[in-house]
Image (tube, helix red, strand yellow):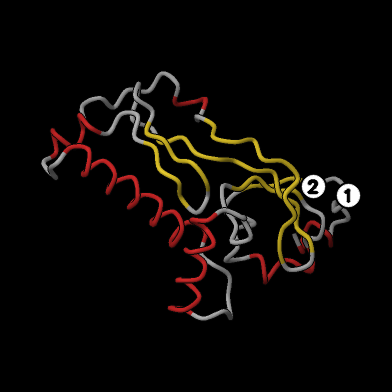
């Protein structure tokens, strides 16, 4: 972003995506990234009960000096919630029982609703258009839980 500004391209570059503007890097680039749009699944300011609890626990453990990690912490937590729900449905951790139970499992995560697509086992989840404002984000639009278009024909039924 700094080089984009130095080359006079700042007004032409208004949209970028993960991980360029992930919360982990935002504090370092926010001064040169104001008003830029980014597509993200998560940021700690989401107002839902699972996220409020997650952020509270995260802050108690790691303090409030830095942002809540988008992928490493929140993404892993959402994955564990999916795995827990699947194991509970399967009644087992055996791979074949787990795989049979996984299709259609949905959980509420800090990012929002996550679902294991029954047709291809690819996880669908929320996606949002955010704008960099000060040292954080402003949500412009919540597109809800979306499947990844390029994986619509994917099949991992053997996992």
Residue that appears at 33% across and 30% down: 121
Image height of 41 relative to 34, above or below: above
Name the mark on residue 11.
1
In this image, 27 relative to 85: left or right? right
Judged from this view, the residue extending furthest toward the front is 49
Q: CA distance from mark 2 to mark 1?
A: 7 Å
Q: What's the mark number on residue 23?
A: none
Label 1 Cα crowd, 10 Å radius (few <14 / some 14-19 / many 20+) = few
Instruction: Say which residue label 2 marks.
Output: 14
Residue 101 position within the rendered picture, expressed as x and y whole percent measured from the top left: 23, 32
User: What x and y, as percent, mark residue 122?
Assistant: 38, 32
Q: Position of residue 126 (x, y in %)?
A: 55, 40
Q: Secondary structure at mark 2?
A: loop
Q: Residue at x 52, y 46 (%)?
A: 112
Quadrant into which the C terminus falls: top left
- Circle 1 SS class: loop
Question: From the image, which quarter does the N terminus lie in?
Answer: bottom right
Is 45 or 149 nearer to us in this picture?
A: 45
Badge 2: how crowded within 10 Å, few (<14), some, or many (20+)? some
Q: Name the residue located 54 percent from the left edge and 62 percent from the top edge.
A: 52
79 in relation to 150, above or below:
below
């Amino acid at each position: 972003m700094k080089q984009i500004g130095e080359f006079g391209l700042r007004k032409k570059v208004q949209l970028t995506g993960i991980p360029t503007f992930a919360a982990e890097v935002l504090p370092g680039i926010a001064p040169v990234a104001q008003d830029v749009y980014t597509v993200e699944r998560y940021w700690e300011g989401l107002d839902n009960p699972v996220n409020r609890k997650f952020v509270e626990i995260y802050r108690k453990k790691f303090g409030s000096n830095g942002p809540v990690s988008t992928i490493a912490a929140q993404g892993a937590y959402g994955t564990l919630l999916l795995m827990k729900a699947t194991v509970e449905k399967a009644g087992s951790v055996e791979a074949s029982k787990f795989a049979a139970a996984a299709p259609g499992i949905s959980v509420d995560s800090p990012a929002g609703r996550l679902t294991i697509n029954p047709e291809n086992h690819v996880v669908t989840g929320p996606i949002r258009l955010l704008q960099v404002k000060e040292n954080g984000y402003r949500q412009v639009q919540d597109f809800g839980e979306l499947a990844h278009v390029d994986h619509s024909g994917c099949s991992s039924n053997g996992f």
